[in-house]
Amino acid sequence: MRKSGILLHPTSLPGECGIGDLGKWAYQFVDFLVAGGQQLWQILPLGPPGCGHSPYQSFSSFAGNPLLINLQALFEQSLLSKEDLQEIPRFPDSYVDFNAVIPFKSRLISKAASAFFRQGSHPLRKEFLDFCERMKYWLDPFAEFAALKNANQGVAWTDWIQKTGAKEEDVLEHQFIQFEFFRQWKSLKKYCNDRGVEIIGDIPIFVAHDSADVWANPQLFDLDGSGQTRTVAGVPPDYFSETGQCWGNPLYRWDVMEQTGYRWWIDRVKFMLETVDIIRLDHFRGFEKYYEIPGDAATAVNGRWKEGPGDRFFEVLQQSLGKIPFIAEDLGYITPEVHALRDRWGFPGMRVIHFAFGDQSLENPHKPHNFVRNCIVYTGTHDNDTTVGWFRRRSGDQVRGEIELALRYMGKDGNDGAWDFIRMALSSVADIAILPMQDVLSLGSEARMNVPATVENNWRWKMRKDQLNPELAGKLYEMNLIYGRLRAF
């Protein structure tokens, strides 16, 4: 069945408190998707972001991002006052100022948690206790980790002075925050599903070293006796970087993982399937082979490829959880063995139209005439420039050549490049087409979400309220109708 959807992280929604959240604008966005004939909403990882505010460097693979909690919902539960919500500062309209948002929202969410526990007979008390019991396998270690991290002024867990004895009230606060996050998320997901919209979530293959995952399960990761990384993940030198990329994520001890029956991974995927409908496996090639770099290396030059868990890993997951709706993120340097692993399990791979015109080979899989049905086509991803930005980059001969080839390929003049690429994606044979919201809005590089290998000023783009309009939804609906991507009744 042919479908289409929008890529938009919830932090990029319009919001009253400086950042997108799970409140009214999220529901209005779902209504926009439905009006546009969209059946999918793709998001980035939902965890509490760490270094550089990146959702791919989270403090937990399970926990939710507290900044996404809607404050109006806390007011409606009598946990915040009307005066609290009248204290909202003036935030920028088109980007998230994390330095201003984090202290503001954190203070009010902490205040709401205190009010919840003061009200011993709060209507949600039993629901909270049930949540804590069901989620204790990840919630207890995360809440303790978060409380101890706060007690140690936020430094990495390997540098903690106070290593035990987190205050009970601090642990309870973090449990409440997670309860409220997932209560709000569950309501939003139901609203999506009831209207025929599925959510595509994202599992990064690796986790952050400074995370509850590693702190609570050091035996599963390649660490030395002091908890520091012996080896880390990355990618080798290539055309784009003479020294490769050193990501710093600790590598798994896959032999130990297998001895435990991949229990940690089963728990992780099972929980994700409760949270979203479809799962994108980031850096899929690492399940076939991964690049190992010494933990003290400054670059990725001296790394080496190691065998990943391969078929056995997916066999165990399927035996435990049944057939899983995975998408394989198979971008970058990919070998035939990675494609074979993907295809043996029937996972759709990714195609990105931005990559169609740099590689002139006949076999370039990103050229629309080379697509297969079982794939997901994107105009661009969260790591790409926007399509308007892509067209504006005319500084070098190679880039200019890419643009000229794209225009010849489409038979267009480039005056509406973003929507030309959108039409190309929607008209293709790919079963699923995903469009970044920035491309739907025809925004330039100022709206780019992330520049890989940089830390500053990423993950900040935010929609303005007036950009979510019925005319745009109508334009999407018309294209989905033309290219057979509307839901069949």
Image (tube, rainbow, N blue to C red):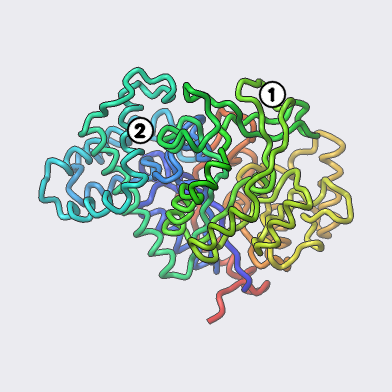
Residue marked by disc 1: 299
Label 1 sits on what residue type?
Answer: Thr
Residue 102 screen position, x and y as percent: 38, 32
The answer to whether residue 473 is visible is no
Residue 391 screen position, x and y as percent: 74, 45
- Nearest the viewer among 430 and 474 is 430
Answer whether labels 1 and 2 touch (C-beta < 8 Å): no
Mark nearer the N terminus (1 vs 2): 2
Furthest-bottom residue in this view:
489
The answer to whether residue 482 is visible is yes
Label 2 sits on what residue type?
Answer: Phe
Circle 2 — which element?
helix
At horizontal 53% and vertical 82% (from top left) the residue drawn is 489
Lateral position of residue 416 relative to residue 88, left or right? right
Residue 140 screen position, x and y as percent: 31, 41
The label shown at residue 291 is none
Circle 1 — which element?
loop
Q: Residues within 10 Å of mark 2 (few under 14, many from 20)?
A: many
- Nearest the viewer among 190 and 406 is 190
Lateral position of residue 400 relative to residue 50, left or right? right
Residue 199 screen position, x and y as percent: 49, 59
- Nearest the viewer among 80 and 28 is 80
At horizontal 30% and vertical 53% (from top left) the residue drawn is 134
- Nearest the viewer among 384 and 200 is 200
Residue marked by disc 2: 145
When asked about the image quadrant of residue 178, the answer is: top left
At horizontal 77% and vertical 48% (from top left) the residue drawn is 335
Rendered-image quadrant of the N terminus = bottom right
At horizontal 20% and vertical 51% (from top left) the residue drawn is 77
Lateral position of residue 395 relative to residue 81, left or right? right
Give me the C-alpha separation between circle 1 and circle 2: 30 Å
383 over 25 or under it: above or below = above
